[in-house]
Image (cartoon, rainbow, N blue to C red):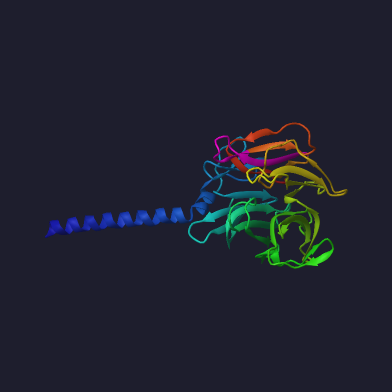
Amino acid sequence: MKARLIVLTVAVLVLLGGSLGYVLHARQRDGGHQVLAAASTFTLDEAGLYYRDTATGRVGRQGGAPDGPSCERFYASGDRALCLRAMPGVPARTQAVVYDRRFSELQTVVVPGIPNRARVSPSGQVLSWTSFAVGDSYAASGFSTRTSVLDLRTGYLIKSVESIPLTVDGVRYHAADVNYWGVNFAADDNRFYATVSSAGKTHLVEGDLHAWSARTLRENVECPSLSPDGTRIAFKKKVSADPAAPWRLYVLELAGMKEHALAESRSVDDQAAWLDGATVGYALPGKDGKGSDVWAVSADGSGEPRLLVPGASSPVTVAAVPR
C-alpha cells in the first residue's frame, strides 16, 4: 500500500510538472512579444537603419542582429514604432501593435485583412496602417483595402478613412468602390498624403485630419512617401500593363507638380521610405524569388541602385534619442 502511494504521488507530480511546463510554454508562446520586450535589450535608442528581417520576421538594425519583435510590416518615428502582424485563422486579420522606443507594448488594435502598409508621423503621435481585405496585391483586380488612423494624443481611432469626404478634380466624389492606402503624414500631424482608388484609377490625395477632408492632386500616384523637408513625394507609378512588372519609382515636387523617374528601373511594389533628404529606400524580391532585399537609390534620379540589407524589408531610418 505504501509503495502504491509513493508511485501514485510520483505520477501526480510528473503530471503536474508536465502541465505546469505546458502552461508556461503556452504563456510564452501566446505572449511571446511581451516576453521579448521585457527580456531583450533591443531598442530604438541607437540611430541607424532599421528593417524587418525576412528570414526570422524580427525587427533588426543594420550592423546588428534582428532581435526585435516579429512583424509583417514595420515602421518607426519619434518615440513610437508600429508593427503589423498576420493573425492565425480565417478570415484574415491584422494585429497592429504600438511600441515605445524600448519595444514595450503600448496598444494593440485588430482589424480585418492582410498586413500591407504601416506609417508613423514624424512626431510619433499619429499612426496609420493598411490591410488588404481581399487579395494580396495592388496589381490584382478586385482588391479591397482598409486603412486606419490612430491618434495617440487623444486615443481616437479612425477605423476606416474611406468615410472621409473626397473631392476629385474640384467636385465632391461619391462611389462605393473607394479605397485608400499608404497614408503618410506631414510634420504637423494633421496634413497627410495617401492613394485613393476608384473606377479603375488611382490618385494622390492630400488630406486634412482636423477638417476631415481630402482632395486629389494627381493621377497615377501610389504609395506616397513624404520627404523629411515636406517638399517632395516618392511614389510608385504604373508604367506598364504587364501584371508581373507594372511599377516604376518616381519623385514628385509638390510645389510645381513636376515628377522624375528614379534610377531604379526594376518594378518596385513597395511604399518607399526616405532614408535621408536625398535617398529613398525600398524592398525588392530576393534573387531566389524568396524573401526580399532592401535597396536604396538617389532621390534626384542620378546614380545607380545599391543593395543595403540583403534578406530584409520595411526599411526606416531612426534618429537618436534627443538628449
Residue at 73% across, 42% down: 249
Q: Quadrant of residue 314?
A: top right
- Judge whether residue 279 is colored magenta: yes
Spot occupied by residue 194 in the image (x, y as percentages of width and height): 73, 55
Rendered position, 282 above or below 22: above
Q: Is residue 171 magenta?
A: no
Most extreme residue toward the front is: 241
Residue at x 60%, y 57% (from the top left corner): 132
Q: Nearer the viewer, residue 15 or 83?
A: 83
Q: Quadrant of the C terminus?
A: top right
- Specify whether residue 319 is in view: no
Point out residue 312 in the picture as x, y percentages from the top left corner.
Answer: 59, 40
Q: Percent from the top left, x then y, of residue 256? A: 88, 48
Which residue sits at x=65%, y=56%? 129
Res. 206 image quadrant: bottom right
Q: Residue furthest left?
A: 1
In-front residue for pair 181/102: 181
Q: Which residues are magenta?
A: 278-293
Which residue is depicted at the point 30% across and 57% down? 16
Q: Residue furthest right?
A: 256
Task: Quadrant for residue 157, please give it.
Answer: bottom right
The answer to whether one can see residue 167 in this image is: yes
Q: Quadrant of the image for the N terminus? A: bottom left
Tally the marks. 0
Q: Position of residue 311 (x, y in %)?
A: 57, 38
Q: Nearer the viewer, residue 6 or 279?
A: 279
